[in-house]
Image (cartoon, grey):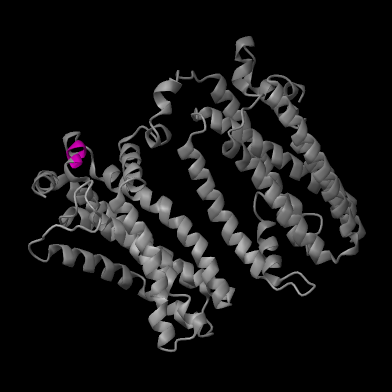
Amino acid sequence: MLGALRGDRRDVIRRIIGVVVLVAATVIAARSASGMADADTLTVAVVTVLAGSAVTLGFAVGPPVTASVDPLDPRRFAVVGPEPRPLAGALLLAGFLSVPVLVVLVLGISLAISWGAHGANALASIVSVVLGLATCVLFARVSMALGALVQRPRQSRELMGVYLVAILVVVVPVGVFLGSLEWRGAVPSQLASAAEILAWTPIGAAWGIALAPSAGAAVGSLVVAVLTVALLTLAWFTLVDVLLTTTRRPVAVRERGGLGWFALLPGTPGGAVAARSLSYWLRDRRYLVNLVIVPIAAVVSMVPLLVAGVPFELAVLLPVPIMALFFGWLPHNDLAYDSTALWMHIASGMRGAPDRIGRLVPVLLISIPVLAVTLPLAIVAHGRWAVFPAMVGVCAALFLAGLGLSSTSSVLAPYAVSRPGDSPFQQPQRTGSGGVMAQGLVMAGAIVTAVPAGWLTWQAIEGKTIDSMFALWIGVGAGAFVLIVGIAIGALLFERRGTRLMEFAEAT
């Protein structure tokens, strides 16, 4: 803690200001937490589990997102030749002496005060706070150790973009969901259900012990919390042993700094293909035009329905499945966009699976955030969150099946496209109907795959007794099956048709 006050003056001043702001925020939050004694028991329980789960998750994902340097990295002590187990225990105890952990302790005590006003057992409150604090510390220790083990490079623009996308995928849907709830002076049933589920997970179990609705629920949360602490402790001791017995490879920062996605992704054939594909998708105008057109076309599709008299709450559900369909369809001719660069894959003897999987990474990285943000907005406009799981199933079936069929189509039936540097709207002359057939079959196959989930979703929209979760798993299962089979067939065809693909690239 004192080491944080050493170093560059600007950094020290910034840290001091951060600590002051954190202390002020902690005081306000602690007063609010202890003041919940006047609220009803359900409200206190829901707020405790949701807030505790969020804080615990923050301890787990905070170190990699902020690129924090661990001052208690076990490898710093390797020069004195310590035994792994005593060092792991000492570092774990020292992990409790930090400003964030002290903040959690203060908030936990404040919550325990409000728990006592609602009849919570004193022993259960103490156990809940202790286990919650231990879980936070262990998650942070293990997260930092894993970051040190994989030798993550310095925080790059690409890595920061991936983290921001991940945060966007989580925060926006959750924010939209919370903003759409009707409180009316009471805790919405959706939040109560979410808190009940989180109380049985590793991030929320410790915070659900004191005010559990029943003795069975309290015991269940206690068991999950104890097992979480035990497994994280085992993981921490194992990681310390590995870190002390593993030799770090020297990393030339100057050489890695300008490689972009190639420095971030694994140095494997699939990682190289994914890095090159990401560079194309984010810079080539031919790809960018497709990405822009898909959301526009999906939104425009609502206009004919509204003109025909379809209710708005039904028409608003259509654009997201259309986007899922087109996003899965986009890579159906990705080999043709490589032009003569395809020779690198074929001349290096690359296997089919790394090529097929690596080319899907850009589509996944771009499409999933768009769908994750737009689908909750569509459900809010529709007005019934009960159909949300079913809509996820439909979109998953369309998207995953499209990717699987595209993985086969791009190898089996590629067709000529505009060359690199040409206008995206300039299309070459084509002989035959192979291109049209490939496009139509991929799209039709994805739609057929999503028919079962779509039918169940329509039944749920009409208010019939259809379990939306069943539609979700049907859609995800069907889409995943087509995706796996499509990648396997595409990989086999890629290895067998290498010569023909090279001839196609040279000819077009």
Q: Is residue 121 visible?
A: no
View extreme (bottom): residue: 309
491 horizontally vs 244: left or right: left
Based on the picture, tell me whether residue 342 belongs to the magenta stretch. yes
Q: Which residues are magenta?
A: 341-345
- Position in image of residue 229 (x %, y %): 68, 41
Q: Residue 253 occupies which quadrant of the picture?
A: top left
Residue in front for this viewpoint, 430 or 384:
430
Residue plotted at (57% across, 20% down): 244
403 horizontally vs 54: left or right: left
Q: Main secondary structure of the magenta part?
A: helix
Residue in front for this viewpoint, 472 or 233:
472
Location of the N terminus by quadrant is top right
Marks counted in the figure total 0
- Position in image of residue 233 (x %, y %): 66, 35
Q: Is residue 34 visible?
A: yes
- Position in image of residue 201 (x %, y %): 64, 53
Based on the picture, tell me whether residue 354 belongs to the magenta stretch. no
Residue in front for this viewpoint, 221 or 450:
450
Residue plotted at (35% across, 44% down): 278
- Position in image of residue 490 (x %, y %): 23, 52
Q: Residue 178 occupies which quadrant of the picture?
A: bottom right
